[in-house]
Amino acid sequence: MNTDRDALPALDPCVVGIDYGTLSGRVVVVRVRDGAELGTAEHPYTHAVLDEALPDGTDLPPDWALQVPSDYLDVLRVAVPEALARSGVRPERIVGVGTDFTACTVLPVLADGTPLCELPQYGGRPHAYVKLWRHHAAQSQADRITALATEREEPWIRRYGGKISSEWEFAKALQLLEEDPEVYARTERWIEAADWIVWRLCGTYVRNACTAGYKGQFQDGAYPSREYLAALDPGFADFVTDKLDHPIGQLGSLAGRLTAEAAAWTGLPEGIAVCVGNVDAHVTAPAATAVEPGRMVAIMGTSTCHVMSSDRWAEVPGMCGVVDGGILPGLWGYEAGQSGVGDIFGWFVRTGFPASYAQEAAALGRDPHEHLTALAARQRVGEHGLIALDWHSGNRSVLVDHDLSGVVVGQTLSTRPEDVYRALLEATAFGTRTVIETFEAAGVPVRELIVAGGLTKNALLMQIYADVTRRPLGVVDSAQGPALGSAMHAAVAAGAYPDIRAAALAMGKARPGVHLPDPERAAAYDRLFAEYRLLHDYFGRGANDVMHRLRRLRAEASPSPSS
């Protein structure tokens, strides 16, 4: 929080950015003229992620990940007023609010926006809830969507690197149709959470161009055809016209004005600008001042999303999409990613952190991650003798297969927790290098890597990324990069800047070259990366299908989703 805010002009306009993450919502109050962050707040979702059972105790099968939409409204009621109070900014100085969301996070609603899970008759139906981005139970539907598009030579499939993800709108909707046709029939809008929260703020449903393009297969002004959808399933033929199609709002444009109800929730002035929704990763690119081709931004949290803009179009295998103007006007916006990063580190701490380590960490005043990082930092590259695959939550890019799983090779009776922890840190860096090399092989150069998110605090992890990728590593100079990016888009919607590029130049924050690659370590990592690629291709490209066989065995032994 700035200490000089009381000296600011009394009418210096500010905007609010709200970042809806996987486990919480973060809010930042930002000064329009220079991007100064004046106050922040965070509110964790009461129900977090439903991956074992619904609130009523209904069991969920593996690979499900649901959320409760009322948790999102609580962020407006709690975190926005708190951030405003901490900022010391009078409400009348706020001229706009912008939001971003994880994606594809999607829910079925009635025509008035009521989530189906809030209807008494559907409270125990898993398909009536929000499907979080990391809901990966629609892999079979995604495989069929890809196979049919390839067979029919649908032109849009090339914009997604040849594969459609189980995380996206159509795969999840097809799963809904096939597993709970009653809930599918009752669904009047299949809506991204990014658009639902904007609807709640301004009373107007506007489908944002970002999620439509990257997660909804909307390319060149059209969705997949009715004929294609009917070939997938006759009951799916009218999915677009009946449940999905809606006017598209461009990024940074005005969705509407804050309603009296939303003003009462937030403490913000009624009638201020509400920006069209956006995706958490994509709003972060301008916050990182990545407004030129070749600057890739990695937004690292529970997962990692890699976004960059380019002046050239290319078919990059396994990318999450390329959209004209998808991040910045006038440039092709590319997206790729890794489904598990911080989630993997968190899983290991939950399952592989012995009591003796916990006692030692407590004595040193460290949390588990800090303790394992400190121990791992003592090692030379390769000293642990391990190599890992970062597929504990499947592979988003470049294989686009969420039935893949994690691997650690080289463990012995001498292997220690810090050895495995460091191998997992390195595996995620190898995954990012795989993404970068795939882009470059397709003719889209990546000159610089800029990282955003809480994981930038881990200096060892950041140095590993610089060494593994052999690129200078910059960091977004904000603890709330996505929320800052949303605030910048709000400033555009409020008319303070003509476009997001101008807002980025005035309000963006990034420190380039914070971590530089060390030639000796980079050479050692080249050898380890070669081993990673062997495992990557062996398990991921069909030489050994054991991961899929194990997944099928697990599915046979698991309960079906209750309906």
Image: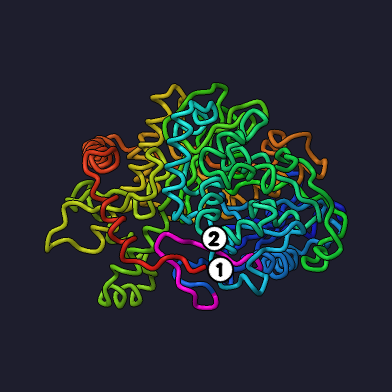
- Rendered image quadrant of residue 70: bottom right
Above or below for 379 versus 227: below
Image point 65% across, 50% down: which residue? Answer: 484
Q: Secondary structure at mark 2?
A: loop
> Which of these two is toward me, 472 or 405?
405
Q: How many marks?
A: 2
Residue 403 can be seen in this image: yes
Can you identify the residue that label 2 sits on?
180
Contact, CB < 8 Å: mark 1 with mark 2? yes
Q: Which residues are magenta?
A: 55-70
Dot label at residue 125: 1
Q: Position of residue 86 (x, y in %)?
A: 71, 66
| Mark earlier in primary sequence (1, 2) | 1
Image point 67% across, 36% down: which residue? Answer: 505
Q: Is residue 58 magenta?
A: yes
Q: Secondary structure at mark 1?
A: loop
Dot label at residue 138: none
> Which of these two is toward me, 515 or 296?
296
**Alpha carbons under labels 1 and 2: distance apart:** 9 Å
Image point 81% across, 45% down: which residue? Answer: 494
Q: How is the image coloured?
A: rainbow
Q: Position of residue 524 (x, y in %)?
A: 22, 39
Q: Amino acid at mark 2?
A: Asp
Q: Nearer the viewer, mark 1 or mark 2?
A: 2
Residue 520 can be seen in this image: no
